Amino acid sequence: MSDLTGRTAVITGGGSGIGAAIARGLADAGCRVAITGRRQERLDDVTDNCSGPVPILARPSDVADRQGVHEFFEWAREELGQIDILVNSAGINTPVRAVATLDPADWDKLIAVNLTGAYNCIHEVLPGMRQRQDGIIINISSVAGKRAGPIGGVAYNASKFGMAALGTTVAEEHRELGIRVTNVYPGEVETPILDDRPVPVTAEHRARILQPEDVADAVLMVVGLPARANVPELIVIPTTQSYR
């Protein structure tokens, strides 16, 4: 594993779930980390409970707000300097998921956060990465971005397929410049997004599925590889979950 000490990372959706676990993992590995999310209290919970060698910095923003994203990244660059690693982990869903009953406003919201939000953040870091010919972008997609099904719902599935295509295209356009892009496709993970399931998820089920730290460990493996090695796609599912 490459030494991550002194590297810089920005994580969206960093106030809870997978994003928070990745932020803690990178900080523990010696990265200088900045996180963002919509809720200040969740960000504060992460920063206040950071046990890594360097503190985690935080500032609220909404990835769907392009100007707000720009202001956040300007702040992050002032605090951290160049951004070496971007992790797009912000994501939402809605309890009403079938195409026949989905509110068009919820379609717009999911696409704006899950897909356009990832684009907004990639757009902010790419100029610096291109100039240095170095950088890592991690997109936390979902197995719903590989195999569309009713559990994820039409808007979530479409946004995650779009996120996958976004990452793949950016990777193809920039691989000769040394910029690495990985699309991570987790299966079921015990995160707050489960609270939006149409059918409540039991405590027993939550205990059987992936935990945020499992996905964080996979991301740490990817970013710790030497510059000559890239993982374009990574699927991580619970042992009990079928991928067929």
Image (cartoon, helix red, strand yellow):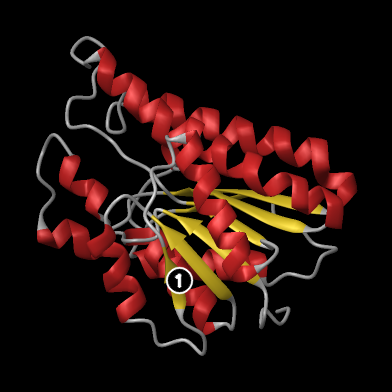
Q: Vertically, is 179 above or below 25?
A: above
Q: Residue at x 32, y 60 (%)?
A: 17
Q: Residue at x 61, y 69 (%)?
A: 80
Tell me which corner region of the image, top left, top right, bottom left or bottom right, holds residue 132: bottom right
Q: Nearer the viewer, residue 72 or 227?
A: 72
Q: Where does the image place residue 141, in percent across and percent down from the top left?
A: 48, 43
Q: Nearer the viewer, residue 143 or 183?
A: 183
Q: Nearer the viewer, residue 119 or 221?
A: 119
Image label count: 1
Q: Which kind of residue does numbered mark 1 sit on?
A: Leu
Q: Residue at x 38, y 65 (%)?
A: 20
Q: Quadrant of the C terminus?
A: top left
Question: As drawn, is 115 to the left or to the right of 61?
Answer: right
Give the structural element (helix, strand or loop) at label 1.
Answer: strand
Q: Where does the image place residue 6, in percent across and percent down from the top left?
A: 67, 80
Q: Where does the image place residue 148, in percent across and percent down from the top left?
A: 41, 27
Task: Tell me the residue that label 1 is attached to.
Answer: 57
Q: Can the viewer see residue 74?
A: yes
Q: Residue at x 80, y 62 (%)?
A: 229
Tell me which corner region of the image, top left, top right, bottom left or bottom right, holds residue 35: bottom left
Q: Nearer the viewer, residue 44 or 118?
A: 44
